[in-house]
Image (cartoon, rainbow, N blue to C red):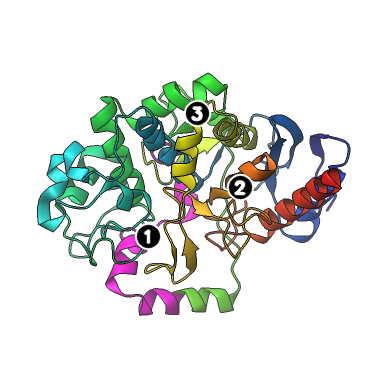
């Protein structure tokens, strides 16, 4: 099969990123994708290529939208930090100060900080209340279920990835303070001022024709068996977070999924839009220096109680930490999405980047395609510093 055409530009000295992007198609199973990087506010990489659908009938365009799964969480966190910067949200105040119903079932003292850092004890809905995929589209239902939920482990005692719950938990705090939904708040406070092509759920008038079709990961028989074993062995905390309900990549192709407001998992955007937003964190447009420091402050290293992976959270963002998932700077921060997408910023090096794709990989974070792009980017950054 012929290599797909790659479009876009790289600044002089950043050609290795284009080479890595092209290699993702040849060697790592890429179908359609885009990658954008900024250096000190200037676009140094802006690439797209491949196909927006598995039939290879629609070329990936500069404005192709992709659902980016948990990359959305970083965008939702930005909304909370905008309110904190404005003095309207105290991250150390109890959630119940803003959302009184959340005090139920022993959660009266849980601070907002623990929502942002996945330590609330409520990583999902308990298995005694099965949740259907379609119920995820009902904001009032999901927030009421989470408000009533008894903690599944001692709040504050450990991080447990709030895979789906994060968006409603943080988003409802934003809604209670701002008096408008998180989709509208994000549009007005973040995306529109920056001219960034990103939304938390597609609005009712959005162009569905711009959306890439997501393709489920290609799994070997060994991977399928390993996943089945892992889910069977998972404790109730992990099962509540990851399997109630259990989502697959193709669910994101349904119009109802696209149009719902699920601030942990259905952000739609371009790589350029993601990079622009993370760039807005670096240049002071979105947050003050104090606000940025608060957002990226380490909450400690740990093994996640849901995923079993080593983590180092800021407030709503992964830190680069020992895994160097966002480049060599361990204090760089961002958020990956299921299957490979990402958005991140590195204040010390003036770097912001975004990556979108439609052929999902099997990993929750640090997909090999993303890592190849990030490593190539920093090879170029190092060369420019020499």
Which segment did they paint magenta?
Answer: 228-257
In the picture, measured across the screen, residue 313 lies left or right of residue 94, that is: right
- The x, y position of residue 384, in whole percent, is 84, 43
Give 132 or 242, whichever is nearer the viewer.
242
Which residue is nearer to you in this view: 273 or 353? 353
User: Magenta segment, principal secondary structure?
Assistant: helix
User: Residue drawn 11% across and 51% down?
Assistant: 104
Residue at the spot of label 1: 246
- The first of marks 2 and 1 along the sequence is 1
Q: Nearer the viewer, mark 3 or mark 1?
A: 3
* Mark 3 crowdedness (10 Å alpha carbons): few <14, some 14-19, many ≥20: many
Which secondary structure lies at badge 2?
Answer: loop
Calculate the distance from the C-alpha at mark 3 to the C-alpha at mark 1: 34 Å
Residue 135, position as x, y percentages in the image: 27, 46
Question: Is residue 163 placed above or below 97 in the rendered structure?
Answer: below
| Residue in the picture at 11% in, 57% down | 105
Q: Please report whichever mark, 2 or 3, sits nearer to the chain's N-terminal start.
A: 3
Single out the mark in the foreground, 2 or 3. 3
CB under 8 Å between discs 2 and 1: no
Judge the density around disc 1: few (<14), some (14-19), many (≥20) Cα neighbours within 10 Å.
few
Task: Write down the residue under mark 3.
Answer: 286
Q: Position of residue 363 (x, y in %)?
A: 56, 62
- From the viewer's perspective, tell me whether residue 383 is left or right of residue 150: right
Q: Specify the quadrant of the image occupied by residue 340.
A: bottom right
Q: Nearer the viewer, residue 362 or 271?
A: 271
Please give the residue where the numbered disc 2 appears in the rendered image: 358
């Amino acid at each position: 099969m012929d290599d797909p055409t790659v479009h876009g530009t790289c600044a002089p000295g950043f050609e290795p990123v284009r080479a890595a992007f092209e290699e993702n198609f040849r060697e790592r199973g890429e179908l359609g994708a885009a990658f954008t990087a900024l250096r000190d506010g200037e676009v140094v990489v802006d690439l797209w290529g491949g196909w927006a659908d598995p039939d290879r009938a629609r070329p990936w365009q500069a404005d192709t939208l992709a659902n980016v799964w948990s990359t959305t969480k970083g965008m939702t966190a930005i909304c909370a930090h905008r309110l904190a910067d404005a003095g309207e949200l105290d991250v150390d105040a109890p959630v119940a100060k803003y959302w009184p119903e959340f005090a139920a079932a022993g959660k009266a003292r849980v601070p907002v900080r623990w929502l942002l850092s996945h330590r609330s004890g409520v990583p999902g809905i308990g298995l005694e209340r099965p949740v259907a995929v379609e119920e995820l589209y009902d904001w009032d239902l999901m927030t009421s279920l989470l408000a009533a939920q008894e903690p599944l482990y001692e709040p504050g005692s450990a991080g447990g990835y709030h895979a789906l719950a994060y968006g409603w938990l943080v988003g409802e705090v934003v809604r209670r303070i701002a008096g408008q939904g998180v989709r509208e708040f994000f549009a007005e406070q973040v995306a529109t001022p920056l001219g960034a092509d990103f939304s938390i759920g597609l609005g009712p008038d959005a162009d569905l024709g711009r959306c890439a079709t997501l393709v489920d990961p290609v799994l070997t028989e060994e991977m399928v068996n390993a996943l089945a074993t892992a889910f069977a062995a998972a404790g109730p905390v992990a099962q509540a977070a990851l399997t109630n309900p259990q989502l697959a990549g193709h669910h994101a192709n349904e119009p109802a999924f696209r149009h719902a407001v699920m601030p942990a998992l259905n952000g739609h955007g371009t790589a350029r839009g993601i990079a622009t937003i993370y760039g807005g964190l670096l240049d002071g447009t979105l947050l003050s220096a104090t606000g940025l420091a608060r957002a990226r402050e380490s909450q400690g290293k740990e093994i996640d109680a849901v995923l079993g992976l080593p983590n180092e959270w800021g407030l709503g963002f992964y830190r680069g930490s020992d895994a160097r998932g966002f480049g060599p700077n361990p204090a760089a921060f961002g958020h990956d999405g299921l299957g490979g997408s990402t958005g991140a910023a590195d204040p010390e090096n003036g770097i912001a980047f975004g990556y979108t794709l439609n052929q999902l990989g099997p990993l929750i974070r640090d997909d090999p395609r993303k890592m190849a792009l990030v490593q190539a980017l920093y090879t170029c950054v190092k060369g420019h510093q020499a």
